[in-house]
Image: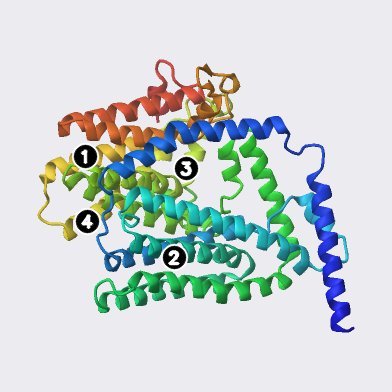
Amino acid sequence: MTTHNMAEADSDARARVRAVRHRYARRGNRATVRGRAFTAYLVTLFALFYLVPVVHAASTSPALVPLGSPARATPMACALAVAACWGAQLAGRFWGPLVMQPFLLHVFMSTDVSPACYLGTIARRRLAYASTAVFLSACTAAYLTTDLFDQPDTALQGLAVAAGLSAVAAVAWLWGQVRAVRDNLALAAAAGVAALVVTAAARAAPEDEGSLWLAAGAPAAAAAVLGRAAFRSIREIDLARLARESARASQAQTYAWTGTLHHALDLYRPEPRGLTSTLIRSDGRFRGYLAQGSIRALRTPGRTIAAVSFLLTGGALLTFGTTGPEGRPALLSWLTGAVCVYLGSGWVSETWRGLRDELTLAPLFGERWGGTLARTLAWPVFAVSVGACLGGGLAVLIRWPLDSGPVNTALLVAGSMVLVLGARFLREMKQHLPLELLLPVVTPLGDLSGLVVIAWQFDGIVAVVIGIAAMNAVPSTLGASALAIGMAACCVWMGLRRTGWAHRGAFARLSRR
Protein backbone atom coordinates (compact mmCIF):
# COMPACT_ATOMS: atom_id res chain seq x y z
CA MET A 1 0.00 0.00 0.00
CA THR A 2 1.43 3.40 -0.97
CA THR A 3 1.54 6.49 1.18
CA HIS A 4 -1.28 8.02 -0.85
CA ASN A 5 -3.49 5.00 -0.27
CA MET A 6 -2.72 5.02 3.46
CA ALA A 7 -3.68 8.68 3.68
CA GLU A 8 -6.94 7.99 1.83
CA ALA A 9 -7.76 5.09 4.19
CA ASP A 10 -7.03 7.23 7.23
CA SER A 11 -9.21 10.09 5.97
CA ASP A 12 -11.99 7.63 5.14
CA ALA A 13 -11.85 6.18 8.66
CA ARG A 14 -12.01 9.66 10.19
CA ALA A 15 -15.00 10.50 8.03
CA ARG A 16 -16.78 7.33 9.13
CA VAL A 17 -16.07 8.06 12.78
CA ARG A 18 -17.38 11.60 12.36
CA ALA A 19 -20.52 10.31 10.68
CA VAL A 20 -21.23 7.83 13.48
CA ARG A 21 -20.71 10.50 16.12
CA HIS A 22 -22.99 12.97 14.36
CA ARG A 23 -25.69 10.36 13.86
CA TYR A 24 -25.51 9.39 17.55
CA ALA A 25 -25.64 13.06 18.59
CA ARG A 26 -28.88 13.51 16.61
CA ARG A 27 -30.76 10.86 18.56
CA GLY A 28 -34.12 11.68 20.15
CA ASN A 29 -32.87 12.66 23.61
CA ARG A 30 -30.49 15.39 22.50
CA ALA A 31 -30.60 18.80 24.15
CA THR A 32 -33.40 21.12 23.09
CA VAL A 33 -33.36 24.85 22.53
CA ARG A 34 -35.39 25.36 25.71
CA GLY A 35 -32.89 23.30 27.71
CA ARG A 36 -29.96 25.31 26.37
CA ALA A 37 -31.79 28.55 27.14
CA PHE A 38 -32.41 27.44 30.73
CA THR A 39 -28.72 26.55 31.12
CA ALA A 40 -27.72 29.96 29.78
CA TYR A 41 -30.19 31.55 32.21
CA LEU A 42 -28.63 29.76 35.18
CA VAL A 43 -25.11 30.70 34.08
CA THR A 44 -26.18 34.32 33.74
CA LEU A 45 -27.68 34.34 37.22
CA PHE A 46 -24.53 32.79 38.64
CA ALA A 47 -22.34 35.36 36.89
CA LEU A 48 -24.42 38.39 37.92
CA PHE A 49 -25.07 37.50 41.55
CA TYR A 50 -21.87 35.64 42.44
CA LEU A 51 -19.03 35.92 39.94
CA VAL A 52 -19.18 39.68 39.31
CA PRO A 53 -19.29 40.64 43.04
CA VAL A 54 -16.46 38.21 43.84
CA VAL A 55 -14.27 39.58 41.04
CA HIS A 56 -15.02 43.15 42.11
CA ALA A 57 -14.20 42.37 45.75
CA ALA A 58 -10.97 40.63 44.76
CA SER A 59 -9.86 43.56 42.60
CA THR A 60 -10.51 46.15 45.32
CA SER A 61 -9.09 44.27 48.34
CA PRO A 62 -5.61 43.03 49.29
CA ALA A 63 -4.56 39.65 47.92
CA LEU A 64 -5.49 36.65 50.02
CA VAL A 65 -2.12 34.99 49.27
CA PRO A 66 0.42 37.76 48.56
CA LEU A 67 3.35 36.46 46.52
CA GLY A 68 5.40 39.61 46.09
CA SER A 69 7.84 38.35 43.46
CA PRO A 70 8.08 35.59 40.84
CA ALA A 71 10.79 33.84 42.87
CA ARG A 72 8.37 33.44 45.78
CA ALA A 73 5.63 32.24 43.43
CA THR A 74 7.75 29.48 41.89
CA PRO A 75 7.41 26.94 44.77
CA MET A 76 3.65 27.41 44.77
CA ALA A 77 3.50 26.96 41.01
CA CYS A 78 5.53 23.74 41.27
CA ALA A 79 3.28 22.45 44.05
CA LEU A 80 0.18 23.19 41.97
CA ALA A 81 1.69 21.45 38.94
CA VAL A 82 2.42 18.32 40.98
CA ALA A 83 -1.06 18.37 42.53
CA ALA A 84 -2.66 18.79 39.09
CA CYS A 85 -0.59 15.93 37.66
CA TRP A 86 -1.39 13.55 40.52
CA GLY A 87 -5.07 14.51 40.61
CA ALA A 88 -5.43 14.08 36.85
CA GLN A 89 -3.77 10.66 36.99
CA LEU A 90 -6.11 9.57 39.76
CA ALA A 91 -9.13 10.89 37.86
CA GLY A 92 -8.01 9.01 34.77
CA ARG A 93 -7.92 5.73 36.67
CA PHE A 94 -11.63 6.11 37.51
CA TRP A 95 -13.08 8.26 34.72
CA GLY A 96 -10.67 8.86 31.87
CA PRO A 97 -11.06 10.80 28.62
CA LEU A 98 -11.72 7.62 26.63
CA VAL A 99 -14.89 6.77 28.57
CA MET A 100 -17.95 7.15 26.36
CA GLN A 101 -21.53 5.93 26.14
CA PRO A 102 -21.63 2.10 26.11
CA PHE A 103 -23.82 1.96 23.00
CA LEU A 104 -21.53 4.26 21.02
CA LEU A 105 -18.46 2.27 22.11
CA HIS A 106 -20.20 -0.96 21.09
CA VAL A 107 -20.94 0.49 17.65
CA PHE A 108 -17.30 1.48 17.14
CA MET A 109 -16.01 -1.86 18.40
CA SER A 110 -18.29 -3.68 15.95
CA THR A 111 -16.73 -2.00 12.91
CA ASP A 112 -13.44 -2.47 11.11
CA VAL A 113 -12.19 0.96 12.22
CA SER A 114 -9.07 0.67 14.39
CA PRO A 115 -9.39 1.74 18.05
CA ALA A 116 -6.60 4.28 17.60
CA CYS A 117 -8.75 6.15 15.06
CA TYR A 118 -11.97 6.68 16.99
CA LEU A 119 -10.41 6.73 20.46
CA GLY A 120 -7.68 9.12 19.33
CA THR A 121 -10.25 11.53 17.92
CA ILE A 122 -12.27 11.49 21.12
CA ALA A 123 -9.15 11.85 23.27
CA ARG A 124 -7.85 14.88 21.36
CA ARG A 125 -11.18 16.68 21.61
CA ARG A 126 -11.65 15.97 25.31
CA LEU A 127 -8.06 16.84 26.19
CA ALA A 128 -8.55 20.19 24.45
CA TYR A 129 -11.70 20.81 26.51
CA ALA A 130 -10.00 19.75 29.75
CA SER A 131 -6.93 21.86 29.07
CA THR A 132 -9.08 24.92 28.38
CA ALA A 133 -11.11 24.39 31.56
CA VAL A 134 -7.99 23.98 33.71
CA PHE A 135 -6.38 27.04 32.13
CA LEU A 136 -9.41 29.26 32.80
CA SER A 137 -9.82 27.91 36.33
CA ALA A 138 -6.14 28.43 37.16
CA CYS A 139 -6.15 31.99 35.82
CA THR A 140 -9.35 32.83 37.69
CA ALA A 141 -8.09 31.36 40.97
CA ALA A 142 -4.76 33.18 40.63
CA TYR A 143 -6.51 36.48 39.89
CA LEU A 144 -8.88 36.15 42.85
CA THR A 145 -6.40 34.96 45.48
CA THR A 146 -2.95 36.29 44.55
CA ASP A 147 -1.28 39.48 43.35
CA LEU A 148 0.35 37.78 40.37
CA PHE A 149 -1.77 39.67 37.83
CA ASP A 150 -1.21 43.11 39.34
CA GLN A 151 1.82 43.83 37.12
CA PRO A 152 1.99 43.22 33.33
CA ASP A 153 5.31 41.31 33.44
CA THR A 154 4.25 38.95 36.22
CA ALA A 155 0.81 38.57 34.61
CA LEU A 156 2.42 37.24 31.42
CA GLN A 157 4.45 34.75 33.45
CA GLY A 158 1.33 33.74 35.33
CA LEU A 159 -0.47 33.03 32.05
CA ALA A 160 2.49 30.89 30.95
CA VAL A 161 2.38 28.93 34.21
CA ALA A 162 -1.36 28.36 33.83
CA ALA A 163 -0.82 27.16 30.25
CA GLY A 164 1.87 24.67 31.33
CA LEU A 165 -0.28 23.53 34.23
CA SER A 166 -3.27 22.92 31.97
CA ALA A 167 -1.17 21.04 29.41
CA VAL A 168 0.38 18.62 31.91
CA ALA A 169 -2.97 18.08 33.67
CA ALA A 170 -4.71 17.13 30.42
CA VAL A 171 -1.94 14.74 29.35
CA ALA A 172 -1.74 13.17 32.81
CA TRP A 173 -5.49 12.56 32.64
CA LEU A 174 -5.03 10.43 29.53
CA TRP A 175 -1.86 8.84 30.91
CA GLY A 176 -3.69 7.69 34.02
CA GLN A 177 -6.21 5.74 31.94
CA VAL A 178 -4.09 4.19 29.20
CA ARG A 179 -0.94 3.30 31.16
CA ALA A 180 -0.38 0.64 33.80
CA VAL A 181 -0.18 1.31 37.53
CA ARG A 182 3.60 0.96 37.47
CA ASP A 183 3.91 3.68 34.82
CA ASN A 184 1.58 5.96 36.79
CA LEU A 185 3.66 5.55 39.92
CA ALA A 186 6.79 6.34 37.91
CA LEU A 187 5.19 9.50 36.51
CA ALA A 188 4.03 10.58 39.96
CA ALA A 189 7.53 10.13 41.40
CA ALA A 190 9.12 11.92 38.45
CA ALA A 191 6.72 14.84 38.83
CA GLY A 192 7.62 15.21 42.50
CA VAL A 193 11.36 15.07 41.80
CA ALA A 194 11.06 17.57 38.94
CA ALA A 195 9.13 19.97 41.16
CA LEU A 196 11.87 19.80 43.80
CA VAL A 197 14.57 20.39 41.19
CA VAL A 198 12.78 23.41 39.71
CA THR A 199 12.17 24.85 43.17
CA ALA A 200 15.83 24.44 44.11
CA ALA A 201 16.92 26.02 40.83
CA ALA A 202 14.60 28.97 41.43
CA ARG A 203 16.01 29.50 44.91
CA ALA A 204 19.57 29.36 43.60
CA ALA A 205 18.90 31.80 40.76
CA PRO A 206 18.99 35.59 41.33
CA GLU A 207 15.79 37.32 42.33
CA ASP A 208 13.22 37.73 39.56
CA GLU A 209 15.42 36.15 36.88
CA GLY A 210 12.78 34.20 35.05
CA SER A 211 12.09 31.57 37.70
CA LEU A 212 8.43 31.45 36.75
CA TRP A 213 9.36 30.88 33.11
CA LEU A 214 11.21 27.76 34.23
CA ALA A 215 8.17 26.63 36.25
CA ALA A 216 6.03 27.14 33.13
CA GLY A 217 8.39 25.53 30.64
CA ALA A 218 9.02 22.32 32.57
CA PRO A 219 5.34 21.19 32.62
CA ALA A 220 4.88 22.17 28.98
CA ALA A 221 7.92 20.12 27.91
CA ALA A 222 6.78 17.18 30.03
CA ALA A 223 3.31 17.38 28.48
CA ALA A 224 4.77 17.27 24.96
CA VAL A 225 6.83 14.15 25.74
CA LEU A 226 4.14 12.34 27.73
CA GLY A 227 1.40 13.17 25.25
CA ARG A 228 3.16 11.40 22.42
CA ALA A 229 3.67 8.26 24.52
CA ALA A 230 0.10 8.35 25.84
CA PHE A 231 -1.45 8.58 22.37
CA ARG A 232 0.69 5.68 21.23
CA SER A 233 -0.64 3.60 24.13
CA ILE A 234 -4.22 4.02 22.87
CA ARG A 235 -3.54 1.32 20.26
CA GLU A 236 -2.89 -1.25 23.01
CA ILE A 237 -5.78 -0.37 25.34
CA ASP A 238 -7.93 -3.19 26.67
CA LEU A 239 -11.31 -2.61 25.01
CA ALA A 240 -13.09 -5.01 27.40
CA ARG A 241 -11.89 -2.99 30.39
CA LEU A 242 -12.86 0.23 28.63
CA ALA A 243 -16.35 -1.19 28.05
CA ARG A 244 -16.70 -2.00 31.75
CA GLU A 245 -15.49 1.47 32.72
CA SER A 246 -17.93 3.06 30.27
CA ALA A 247 -20.85 1.01 31.60
CA ARG A 248 -20.02 1.96 35.18
CA ALA A 249 -19.61 5.63 34.23
CA SER A 250 -22.95 5.62 32.42
CA GLN A 251 -24.67 4.14 35.47
CA ALA A 252 -23.00 6.65 37.77
CA GLN A 253 -24.04 9.49 35.47
CA THR A 254 -27.63 8.28 35.56
CA TYR A 255 -27.55 8.19 39.36
CA ALA A 256 -26.11 11.71 39.48
CA TRP A 257 -28.76 13.05 37.10
CA THR A 258 -31.58 11.51 39.15
CA GLY A 259 -30.33 13.07 42.38
CA THR A 260 -28.72 10.09 44.14
CA LEU A 261 -25.11 11.23 44.00
CA HIS A 262 -24.06 9.02 46.91
CA HIS A 263 -25.22 5.97 44.96
CA ALA A 264 -23.07 7.11 42.04
CA LEU A 265 -20.04 7.36 44.32
CA ASP A 266 -20.76 3.91 45.75
CA LEU A 267 -20.02 2.44 42.32
CA TYR A 268 -16.40 3.54 42.67
CA ARG A 269 -15.78 2.15 46.14
CA PRO A 270 -12.97 -0.42 46.17
CA GLU A 271 -13.88 -3.97 47.03
CA PRO A 272 -12.43 -5.21 50.36
CA ARG A 273 -9.84 -7.94 49.89
CA GLY A 274 -8.17 -10.39 52.26
CA LEU A 275 -8.06 -10.61 56.07
CA THR A 276 -11.56 -12.09 56.26
CA SER A 277 -10.67 -14.75 58.82
CA THR A 278 -8.75 -12.23 60.93
CA LEU A 279 -12.02 -10.70 62.15
CA ILE A 280 -12.70 -13.83 64.23
CA ARG A 281 -10.60 -15.07 67.13
CA SER A 282 -9.42 -18.64 67.40
CA ASP A 283 -12.24 -19.44 69.84
CA GLY A 284 -14.87 -18.34 67.29
CA ARG A 285 -15.75 -14.97 68.83
CA PHE A 286 -15.52 -11.64 67.05
CA ARG A 287 -12.68 -9.32 67.94
CA GLY A 288 -13.17 -6.01 69.70
CA TYR A 289 -14.72 -2.99 68.06
CA LEU A 290 -11.42 -1.18 67.44
CA ALA A 291 -9.74 -4.34 66.16
CA GLN A 292 -12.61 -4.98 63.75
CA GLY A 293 -12.48 -1.43 62.46
CA SER A 294 -8.72 -1.48 61.92
CA ILE A 295 -8.88 -4.83 60.10
CA ARG A 296 -11.67 -3.60 57.83
CA ALA A 297 -9.63 -0.48 57.09
CA LEU A 298 -6.64 -2.63 56.10
CA ARG A 299 -8.85 -4.54 53.66
CA THR A 300 -9.05 -1.36 51.52
CA PRO A 301 -5.46 -0.04 51.69
CA GLY A 302 -5.93 2.65 49.03
CA ARG A 303 -8.78 4.34 50.86
CA THR A 304 -6.96 3.96 54.17
CA ILE A 305 -3.80 5.65 52.87
CA ALA A 306 -5.89 8.51 51.48
CA ALA A 307 -7.76 8.81 54.79
CA VAL A 308 -4.55 8.93 56.83
CA SER A 309 -3.12 11.60 54.52
CA PHE A 310 -6.25 13.75 54.77
CA LEU A 311 -6.51 13.33 58.54
CA LEU A 312 -2.89 14.31 59.15
CA THR A 313 -3.13 17.27 56.77
CA GLY A 314 -6.48 18.33 58.20
CA GLY A 315 -5.25 18.15 61.79
CA ALA A 316 -2.22 20.29 60.93
CA LEU A 317 -4.31 22.87 59.07
CA LEU A 318 -6.85 22.97 61.90
CA THR A 319 -4.07 23.73 64.38
CA PHE A 320 -2.56 26.40 62.14
CA GLY A 321 -5.98 27.99 61.64
CA THR A 322 -6.96 28.04 65.30
CA THR A 323 -3.57 29.29 66.54
CA GLY A 324 -2.86 31.88 63.85
CA PRO A 325 -3.80 35.56 64.02
CA GLU A 326 -7.34 36.46 63.13
CA GLY A 327 -7.85 37.08 59.45
CA ARG A 328 -8.65 35.41 56.15
CA PRO A 329 -5.52 33.19 55.98
CA ALA A 330 -6.27 31.66 59.38
CA LEU A 331 -9.94 31.17 58.52
CA LEU A 332 -9.02 29.61 55.16
CA SER A 333 -6.61 27.21 56.88
CA TRP A 334 -9.29 26.35 59.45
CA LEU A 335 -11.91 25.67 56.77
CA THR A 336 -9.53 23.62 54.62
CA GLY A 337 -8.44 21.55 57.59
CA ALA A 338 -12.04 20.84 58.60
CA VAL A 339 -12.91 19.75 55.05
CA CYS A 340 -9.84 17.47 54.94
CA VAL A 341 -10.81 15.84 58.23
CA TYR A 342 -14.36 15.46 56.90
CA LEU A 343 -13.12 13.63 53.81
CA GLY A 344 -10.74 11.45 55.82
CA SER A 345 -13.45 10.52 58.31
CA GLY A 346 -15.50 8.97 55.52
CA TRP A 347 -12.64 7.09 53.89
CA VAL A 348 -11.20 5.64 57.08
CA SER A 349 -13.92 3.06 57.51
CA GLU A 350 -16.92 1.42 55.88
CA THR A 351 -18.79 1.14 59.18
CA TRP A 352 -20.74 4.32 58.41
CA ARG A 353 -22.63 2.40 55.74
CA GLY A 354 -23.12 -0.50 58.14
CA LEU A 355 -24.67 1.84 60.68
CA ARG A 356 -27.01 3.26 58.05
CA ASP A 357 -28.09 -0.22 56.98
CA GLU A 358 -28.69 -1.35 60.54
CA LEU A 359 -30.76 1.74 61.32
CA THR A 360 -32.87 1.52 58.18
CA LEU A 361 -33.37 -2.25 58.56
CA ALA A 362 -34.22 -2.09 62.24
CA PRO A 363 -37.61 -3.88 61.90
CA LEU A 364 -35.77 -6.83 60.36
CA PHE A 365 -33.04 -7.03 62.98
CA GLY A 366 -35.24 -6.04 65.91
CA GLU A 367 -34.64 -3.27 68.43
CA ARG A 368 -32.75 -5.25 71.07
CA TRP A 369 -29.63 -6.26 69.15
CA GLY A 370 -27.96 -3.46 71.17
CA GLY A 371 -24.67 -1.62 71.07
CA THR A 372 -25.16 -0.20 67.59
CA LEU A 373 -23.45 3.14 68.18
CA ALA A 374 -20.52 1.63 70.09
CA ARG A 375 -20.02 -1.18 67.58
CA THR A 376 -20.07 1.02 64.48
CA LEU A 377 -18.72 4.38 65.65
CA ALA A 378 -15.88 3.26 67.92
CA TRP A 379 -13.31 2.89 65.14
CA PRO A 380 -14.22 6.01 63.08
CA VAL A 381 -14.19 8.27 66.15
CA PHE A 382 -10.92 6.76 67.39
CA ALA A 383 -9.21 6.93 63.98
CA VAL A 384 -10.32 10.51 63.30
CA SER A 385 -9.27 11.67 66.76
CA VAL A 386 -5.85 10.01 66.60
CA GLY A 387 -5.12 11.10 63.02
CA ALA A 388 -6.15 14.72 63.58
CA CYS A 389 -4.28 14.89 66.89
CA LEU A 390 -1.10 13.55 65.29
CA GLY A 391 -1.35 16.14 62.53
CA GLY A 392 -2.01 18.84 65.12
CA GLY A 393 0.98 17.67 67.15
CA LEU A 394 3.24 18.01 64.13
CA ALA A 395 1.88 21.52 63.56
CA VAL A 396 2.55 22.44 67.19
CA LEU A 397 6.15 21.23 66.87
CA ILE A 398 6.59 23.40 63.79
CA ARG A 399 4.98 26.50 65.31
CA TRP A 400 5.97 26.79 68.96
CA PRO A 401 5.18 28.77 71.05
CA LEU A 402 1.58 29.13 69.99
CA ASP A 403 -0.01 32.54 69.46
CA SER A 404 -2.99 31.44 71.56
CA GLY A 405 -2.99 29.30 74.67
CA PRO A 406 -2.80 25.50 74.40
CA VAL A 407 -6.13 25.13 76.18
CA ASN A 408 -7.94 27.41 73.72
CA THR A 409 -6.34 25.61 70.78
CA ALA A 410 -7.32 22.21 72.14
CA LEU A 411 -10.92 23.33 72.69
CA LEU A 412 -11.27 24.76 69.20
CA VAL A 413 -9.71 21.72 67.52
CA ALA A 414 -11.85 19.34 69.59
CA GLY A 415 -15.00 21.32 68.79
CA SER A 416 -14.11 21.29 65.08
CA MET A 417 -13.64 17.51 65.11
CA VAL A 418 -16.96 16.99 66.89
CA LEU A 419 -18.65 19.18 64.27
CA VAL A 420 -16.99 17.22 61.46
CA LEU A 421 -18.10 13.88 62.89
CA GLY A 422 -21.65 15.17 63.24
CA ALA A 423 -21.64 16.38 59.63
CA ARG A 424 -20.28 13.01 58.48
CA PHE A 425 -23.06 11.23 60.38
CA LEU A 426 -25.61 13.48 58.65
CA ARG A 427 -24.18 12.70 55.24
CA GLU A 428 -23.91 8.94 55.71
CA MET A 429 -27.50 8.59 56.92
CA LYS A 430 -28.70 9.96 53.58
CA GLN A 431 -31.33 7.93 51.72
CA HIS A 432 -32.92 8.51 48.33
CA LEU A 433 -33.65 12.02 47.13
CA PRO A 434 -36.83 13.31 48.84
CA LEU A 435 -39.59 13.98 46.34
CA GLU A 436 -40.45 17.35 47.86
CA LEU A 437 -37.03 18.69 46.86
CA LEU A 438 -38.08 18.44 43.22
CA LEU A 439 -40.95 20.88 43.74
CA PRO A 440 -40.31 24.38 42.33
CA VAL A 441 -39.02 27.09 44.68
CA VAL A 442 -40.43 30.25 43.13
CA THR A 443 -38.46 33.43 43.90
CA PRO A 444 -38.08 36.81 42.15
CA LEU A 445 -34.87 35.40 40.64
CA GLY A 446 -36.61 32.36 39.20
CA ASP A 447 -36.87 28.72 40.22
CA LEU A 448 -34.10 27.92 42.73
CA SER A 449 -35.03 24.30 43.36
CA GLY A 450 -31.73 23.26 41.76
CA LEU A 451 -29.82 25.03 44.53
CA VAL A 452 -31.83 23.12 47.13
CA VAL A 453 -30.94 19.83 45.47
CA ILE A 454 -27.25 20.80 45.38
CA ALA A 455 -27.36 21.72 49.07
CA TRP A 456 -28.93 18.33 49.83
CA GLN A 457 -26.24 16.54 47.82
CA PHE A 458 -23.39 18.26 49.68
CA ASP A 459 -25.09 18.83 53.03
CA GLY A 460 -22.11 17.51 55.02
CA ILE A 461 -19.61 19.95 53.53
CA VAL A 462 -22.17 22.77 53.80
CA ALA A 463 -22.64 22.02 57.51
CA VAL A 464 -18.86 21.99 58.07
CA VAL A 465 -18.28 25.30 56.25
CA ILE A 466 -21.18 27.07 57.97
CA GLY A 467 -20.16 25.66 61.36
CA ILE A 468 -16.52 26.73 61.08
CA ALA A 469 -17.53 30.20 59.87
CA ALA A 470 -19.91 30.53 62.84
CA MET A 471 -17.20 29.35 65.27
CA ASN A 472 -14.80 31.91 63.86
CA ALA A 473 -17.38 34.67 64.40
CA VAL A 474 -17.85 33.79 68.10
CA PRO A 475 -15.33 35.77 70.20
CA SER A 476 -15.22 33.30 73.11
CA THR A 477 -13.42 29.95 72.86
CA LEU A 478 -15.91 28.22 75.14
CA GLY A 479 -18.79 29.72 73.18
CA ALA A 480 -17.32 28.52 69.88
CA SER A 481 -16.81 24.99 71.26
CA ALA A 482 -20.34 24.92 72.67
CA LEU A 483 -21.69 26.11 69.32
CA ALA A 484 -19.81 23.32 67.52
CA ILE A 485 -21.20 20.70 69.91
CA GLY A 486 -24.72 22.06 69.46
CA MET A 487 -24.45 21.99 65.66
CA ALA A 488 -23.06 18.44 65.80
CA ALA A 489 -26.02 17.40 67.96
CA CYS A 490 -28.39 18.95 65.40
CA CYS A 491 -26.63 17.04 62.60
CA VAL A 492 -26.97 13.77 64.53
CA TRP A 493 -30.65 14.41 65.20
CA MET A 494 -31.30 15.21 61.55
CA GLY A 495 -29.42 12.06 60.56
CA LEU A 496 -31.55 9.96 62.86
CA ARG A 497 -34.66 11.56 61.39
CA ARG A 498 -33.55 10.39 57.96
CA THR A 499 -33.46 6.80 59.17
CA GLY A 500 -36.72 7.00 61.14
CA TRP A 501 -35.11 6.80 64.60
CA ALA A 502 -35.62 10.39 65.75
CA HIS A 503 -38.27 9.70 68.36
CA ARG A 504 -38.33 9.40 72.11
CA GLY A 505 -36.04 6.75 73.56
CA ALA A 506 -34.11 6.24 70.31
CA PHE A 507 -30.70 6.87 71.86
CA ALA A 508 -31.47 4.55 74.76
CA ARG A 509 -32.35 1.72 72.38
CA LEU A 510 -29.36 2.37 70.16
CA SER A 511 -26.93 2.27 73.08
CA ARG A 512 -28.55 -0.71 74.82
CA ARG A 513 -26.34 -3.79 75.04
Nearer mark to the viewer, of 2 and 3: 2
Specify the quadrant of the image occupied by residue 198. bottom left
- For the point 24% across and 40% down, which residue is it? 414
Q: Which residue type does callout 1 highlight? A: Leu
Q: Secondary structure at mark 2?
A: helix
137 left or right, relative to 11? left
Nearer mark to the viewer, of 1 and 3: 1
Q: CA distance from mark 1 to mark 3?
A: 27 Å
| Res. 194 mark | none
Q: Is residue 162 at all visible to an observer of this figure?
A: yes
Q: Which residue is mark 2?
A: 160
Q: CA distance from mark 4 to mark 2?
A: 34 Å
Q: Which residue is mark 4?
A: 395
63 left or right, relative to 251? left
Q: Which residue is mark 3?
A: 351
- Where residue 464 sits: x, y (%)? 36, 36
93 left or right, relative to 24? left
Q: Nearer the viewer, residue 332 or 268?
A: 332
Q: Nearer the viewer, residue 437 or 219?
A: 219
Q: Secondary structure at mark 3?
A: helix
Q: Which residue is mark 1?
A: 412
Disc 4 crowd rating (10 Å Cα; few below 14, some 14-19, many 20+) is: many
- For the point 55% across and 39% down, which residue is it? 262
Q: Are marks 1 and 4 in contact (CB under 8 Å)?
A: no
Quadrant in which the N terminus is drawn: bottom right
Of the image marks 1 and 3, the number of the one nearer the N terminus: 3
Of the image marks 2 and 1, the number of the one nearer the N terminus: 2
Q: Nearer the viewer, residue 391 or 177?
A: 177
